[in-house]
Image (cartoon, rainbow, N blue to C red):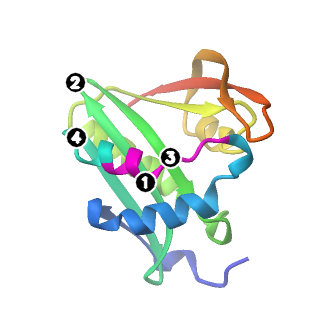
């Protein structure tokens, strides 16, 4: 586990200039067996749209995680949240999630939702943050070995 103190963690607003950092973190954070990671083109494409924001987490100036979200009217969606394995268990995921919620509230959102693969260990984080299941897409995610996984839609009131 990392020896960098949690107190030396910062959240900063990101832009398309930070796409290399986002992709490096995504590569480390998402297991390729589940097919959840976005491509560079997908990230670049959505980051250019209105209502989308990127938050970066850094520990001692080094990339640690990110969250990508968007807001439309009174709803917001957490599109991606990733924390590099060596930086897990320091509250970075929760800090990113709380910052996304705060940003969404500041733009008038009253509900935050997300979608994740069934069995994703982050479900504990989302449950503790007040999210609950509102829907399910059967066999939505495809693993590299041909296996499929349900997508679970979660939401919480802001």
First in residue order: circle 2 vs circle 3: 3
Q: Is residue 12 visible?
A: yes
First in residue order: circle 4 vs circle 3: 3
The 10 Å Cα crowd at callout 1, few under 14, some 14 to 19, many 20 or more, is few
CA separation in Å, label 2 and label 3: 25 Å
CA separation in Å, label 2 and label 4: 14 Å
Rendered image: mark on residue 38: 3
Rendered image: mark on residue 40: 1
| Magenta-tinted stretch | 35-44
Q: Secondary structure at mark 4?
A: loop
Q: In the rendered image, which quarter contains the N terminus? A: bottom right
CA separation in Å, label 4 and label 1: 15 Å
Residue 99: image x %, image y %? 38, 51
Disc nearest the viewer among 2 and 3 = 3
- Does 132 appear in magenta? no
Disc nearest the viewer among 2 and 1 = 1
**112 in relation to 46, above or below:** above
- Residue plotted at (28% across, 33% down): 71
């Amino acid at each position: 586990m990392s020896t960098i103190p949690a107190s030396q963690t910062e959240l900063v607003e990101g832009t398309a200039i930070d796409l290399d950092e986002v992709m490096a973190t995504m590569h480390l954070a998402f297991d390729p067996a589940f097919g959840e990671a976005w491509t560079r083109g997908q990230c670049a494409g959505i980051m250019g749209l209105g209502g989308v924001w990127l938050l970066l987490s850094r520990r001692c100036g080094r990339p640690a995680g990110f969250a990508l979200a968007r807001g439309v009217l009174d709803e917001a969606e957490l599109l991606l949240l990733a924390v590099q394995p060596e930086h897990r268990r320091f509250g970075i995921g929760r800090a990113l999630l709380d910052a996304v919620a705060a940003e969404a509230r500041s733009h008038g959102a009253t509900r935050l939702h997300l979608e994740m693969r069934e069995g994703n260990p982050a479900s504990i984080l989302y449950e503790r943050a007040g999210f609950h299941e509102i829907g399910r897409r059967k066999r939505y995610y495809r693993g590299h070995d041909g296996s499929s996984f349900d997508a679970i839609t979660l939401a919480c009131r802001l």
